Image (cartoon, rainbow, N blue to C red):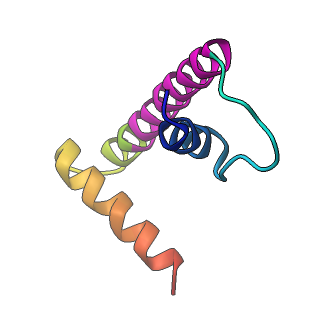
Amino acid sequence: MEYEFFSDLYKDVHGFRPHGLIQPTAELVDYLQRELECQIVREREEQQKAVDICMSVGASSPDVALRWLEQADYADYY
């Protein structure tokens, strides 16, 4: 197993690369992959809830709702 793959996977799950002497084991990689899958499911569910809310207040389609959400996120940066 390449350490780069493990480091990328660890960062995807935790938001930062592993520090210290964390050794990638098959069990740790399996855990990280399951955790990443759970995070993806939660993010999709949250996005769907946000789309549903936009639809309930006037978005004419899911595409319009996603555009509204993208614009709202963009506005948060300024």
Q: Answer with left or right where residue 32 lies relative to residue 37.
A: right
Residue 32, image quadrant: top right
The x and y percentages for residue 26 are 60, 14
Q: Left or right? Give the position of 61 relative to 51.
A: left
**Residue at point 47%, 31% (across, down):** 40
The relative height of residue 20 versus residue 71 in the rendered view (above or below) is above
- The boundaries of the magenta stretch are 26-50
Where residue 21 sits: x, y (%)? 81, 41
Please say whether residue 63 is one of the residues in the magenta stretch.
no
Number of numbered discs visible in the structure rendering? 0
Residue 61 horizontal side relative to residue 78, left or right = left
Does the magenta segment cover residue 38?
yes
Q: Position of residue 44 (x, y in %)?
A: 42, 33
| 5, 9: nearer the viewer | 5
Predominant secondary structure, magenta span:
helix
Furthest residue to the bottom? Answer: 78
